[in-house]
Image (cartoon, rainbow, N blue to C red):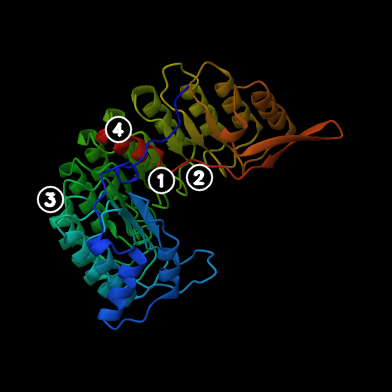
Amino acid sequence: MVNMTPLLFPWQQTLVPTSMMANETISQRYTAVCDKHEIKINPFILNVLQQTSEAERNFTLNLRGNDNQPVLQRLGDEDVFAMSKCLQNHQAVTGLDLRYNNVSDEGARHLADLIKVENSALRSLNLMFNNIQKEGAELLAGGLQQNHSLMSLKLSGNKLSKKGFVALGRALQRNQTLQELQLADCDLDTTDVLTLSIVLKINQTLRSVDISRPLLFSLQEEWTWSFSEMLETNSSLVELHLGKMGLTDTGLERLARGLKQNRSLRYLDLRCNRVTRDGAQHLAEVLTQNSSLEVLDLSANRIEDEGATCLSGAIARPECPLREFSVCRNNIRTEGLLSLSQAVASASGLTHLYIWGNQLQEPVCRAFSQLISGGHLAPEHTDVSPYQVDGHVFLAEVNQRLRSTLFCLETVGAATS
């Protein structure tokens, strides 16, 4: 059985601390910066900083705008300016989480200045779902070109525009530190996706990339040719998210050519696409030739019974590398689900299986109840839980799903241990 305990990012590991300027606490430093620049103190920031232990080292400062906090005032650009000044000489904070705030291009400018600092301690920066657009993306790209410490950048939910994305692409051709990049819901178009595939042929540092939900209006799926070629040559990418791409069986057939040759990818996310039984057959062929793919997310497609049965045959092979598999909401009936349960019960290495949202008739309920009671499928490794009423077995939904950053964490941790 695979050891599923994730290793830590480097910024979560113990490093030698550096004292703050003049031995100020971080909250005192923040207050002093606000006073000097005549910025109104944000009570949310101050409350979080006052609760921060000065004994802590190498931690992520959580200033999420969607937190359930007694005092919550979302950060604006002035707040980001104050925080960037506060953190320039603070070596203990190695992660900054600013998702769901009101950070615009001006705030991105201050953060770009922060990551440009030669001795920057920042290893992770989360800016998901703010208001960063073209200029902000260009400024952050400029910071990335000079930065040698940042390893994770999350920009999902920001409308970066074509020029902003082009600037990021250029920066990624030079940057040799960044290992995780999230660009989901950034309104990337076909040209942007093609550009990223070219970047990934050059960049050999990125481990995890998420470009889910772009705006692709072409029905030709040109990007699949380019990504297939990239997968044939790229040896560093471990985790790839291609959810909500409008991917069809034809596009998946093209991707499968590159996947068969790839030897590094361990996590492939294809959820919310248009994959049917034919696409499932292409993936089954991948599983017979690829020796590295361990997690596959096919949630919210339509592979149905024939697709599930075909994949079950590939999974049941002892040499199949797949360990975690999600087929939630795929219109799979009794035949397909029973074939998947038999694959788990066989000598295969599949240890995690998620099936909720399909047609769970009683034979399926009994089969999965036996898998769980017999120790073939741990209760925490699936999203269903059996129960009985009047001698009949049913399955209830359990809120458990694939872990989207497991392999990026493992890889980055192993690279620095």
The residue that label 2 is drawn on is 301
In this rendering, would 368 be left or right of 278? Answer: right
**Which disc, if any, is residue 414?**
4
In this rendering, would 190 be left or right of 280? Answer: left
Could you say whether the residue bearing mark 2 is in a helix, strand or loop? Answer: loop
The residue that label 1 is drawn on is 248
Chain-order first, disc 3 or disc 4: 3
For the residues marked 2 and 3, what is the alpha-carbon distance in whole angstroms? 37 Å
Q: Which of 245 and 395 lies nearest the eye of the viewer?
A: 395
For the residues marked 1 and 2, what is the alpha-carbon distance in whole angstroms? 10 Å
Chain-order first, disc 4 or disc 1: 1
Q: Residue at x 48, y 32 (%)?
A: 324
Residue 88 in which image quadrant: bottom left
Could you say whether the residue bearing mark 1 is in a helix, strand or loop? Answer: loop
Q: Residue at x 42, y 52 (%)?
A: 244
Residue 224 in which image quadrant: top left
Q: Mark 1: which amino acid?
A: Thr
Name, please, the residue furthest toward the right: 390
The residue that label 3 is drawn on is 174
Could you say whether the residue bearing mark 4 is in a helix, strand or loop? Answer: helix
Chain-order first, disc 4 or disc 2: 2
Chain-order first, disc 1 or disc 2: 1
Q: Position of residue 337 (x, y in %)?
A: 61, 31
Q: Mark 4: which amino acid?
A: Ala
Mark in front: 3 vs 1: 3
Q: Which of 66 and 94 lies nearest the eye of the viewer?
A: 94
